[in-house]
Amino acid sequence: MSKVTTYVNDTVEEMRDKVSWPTYSELQRSSVLVLIGSLIFALVVGAMDFVFDSGLTWFYNQF
């Protein structure tokens, strides 16, 4: 049990003193960047899906 207590105390100390937490404005900027990146990625994947679906539908209708 002593090892668990030591681990928890060390973890709390590290989270309090050694971790550099972002400011609120940095967090907002990062969140907006992730949102924009996710939307761009979703649009690219959606466009690829549309192109492949249209191409395969056209190909199968040829036979």
Image: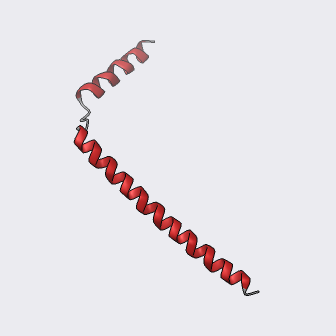
51 relative position to 28: left or right? right
- Whether residue 12 sits left or right of residue 60 in the image: it is left
Most foreground residue, 20 or 11: 20
Residue 25 in the image, given as x and y percentages of width and height: 23, 42
According to the image, what is the colour scheme of the structure?
secondary structure
Mark count: 0
Residue drawn at 36 percent across, 57 percent down: 36
Query: What x and y, as percent, mark residue 22?
Result: 25, 39
Question: Is residue 21 depicted above or below 4 in this figure?
Answer: below
Quarter holding residue 27 = top left
- Residue 38 position by quadrant: bottom left
Image quadrant containing the C terminus: bottom right
The percent coordinates of residue 16 (x first, y second) are 26, 25
Give the farthest residue toward the top.
1
Residue that extends furthest to the bottom in the rendered view of this protein: 62
Q: Residue 19's spot in the image, x, y percent?
A: 26, 33
The residue that appears at 32% across and 22% down in the rendered structure is 12
Residue 55 vs 3, above or below: the answer is below
Residue at the spot 38% in from the left edge and 20% down from the top edge = 8
Extreme residue toward the right, this view: 63
Q: Is residue 7 above or below residue 48?
A: above
Residue sitting nearer the eye, 12 or 42: 42
Q: Residue at x 56, y 75 (%)?
A: 51
